[in-house]
Image: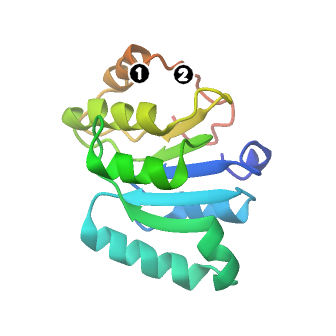
Amino acid sequence: YMVPNAELMKGKKVLELGAGLGLCGLLAHFLGAKQVTLTDGDTDVLANMRDNVASNTINKEKNENTISCHQLRWGKSNHDIEVLATQFGKFDMILASDVIYMKEAIEPLFDTIMELLTMEKNGVVWLSYARRNVGIDAVLSCAERHGLQWTTPEYNHGAI
């Protein structure tokens, strides 16, 4: 979905939540995002993410200004969010791919999104969902309670 829609992220400040090894954030970087901030709450995952970013970016001097990795635990107004918001401000686009494993994570995820997504410049969230222990209705309901609207993309080659 990201590649055919690359024009939507060009020149944008992009945040990836629950980035793991940072695949989506790295792709956003290579597709022309102005600034990419990769985050994960797990310290071990964060170390591997940093190694992966270093191994997959060519011009290290330029990349330090455009792609970075940070620890971020989700939830309303926590210290990690305050630090990130102070350093980077609000983000034009938030990516979250396969990040919902349990129902208890939904509310903190959307609290974090609302703290870090710009509302002034048509901020957008690209959330990819994998069926696990949480139904999509709970996810979409939480998004609506937070004042977000959702659409299902037309580009859907094999994805549901």
Of label 1 and label 2, which has the lower sequence position? 1
For residue 43, what is the image quadrant?
bottom left
Whether residue 153 appears in this view of the structure is yes
Q: Which residue is mark 2?
A: 150
Give the answer, above or below, for where 16 lies relative to 124. below
- Horizontally, residue 45 falls left or right of residue 133, namely right
For residue 65, what is the image quadrant?
bottom right
Whether residue 28 appears in this view of the structure is no
Q: CA distance from mark 1 to mark 2?
A: 7 Å
Which residue sits at x=66%, y=63%?
29
Give coordinates of residue 82: x percent, y percent: 36, 46
- Horizontally, residue 103 falls left or right of residue 64, namely left
**Amino acid at circle 1:** Leu
Which residue sits at x=41%, y=21%?
140
Pointers 1 and 2 in contact (CB under 8 A)? yes
Which residue sits at x=75%, y=59%?
32
Q: Which residue is mark 1?
A: 140
Give coordinates of residue 8: x percent, y percent: 75, 42
Give the answer, above or below, for where 116 lies relative to 63. above
Q: Secondary structure at mark 2?
A: loop
Q: Secondary structure at mark 1?
A: helix
Give coordinates of residue 42: x percent, y percent: 26, 63
- Horizontally, residue 7 falls left or right of residue 9, namely right
Which residue sits at x=48%, y=78%?
52
Q: Which mark is residue 31?
A: none
Give the answer, above or below, for where 57 lies relative to 137. below
**Amino acid at circle 2:** Trp
Which image quarter holds the N terminus? top right
- Residue located farthest toward the front when viewing the structure as drawn: 86
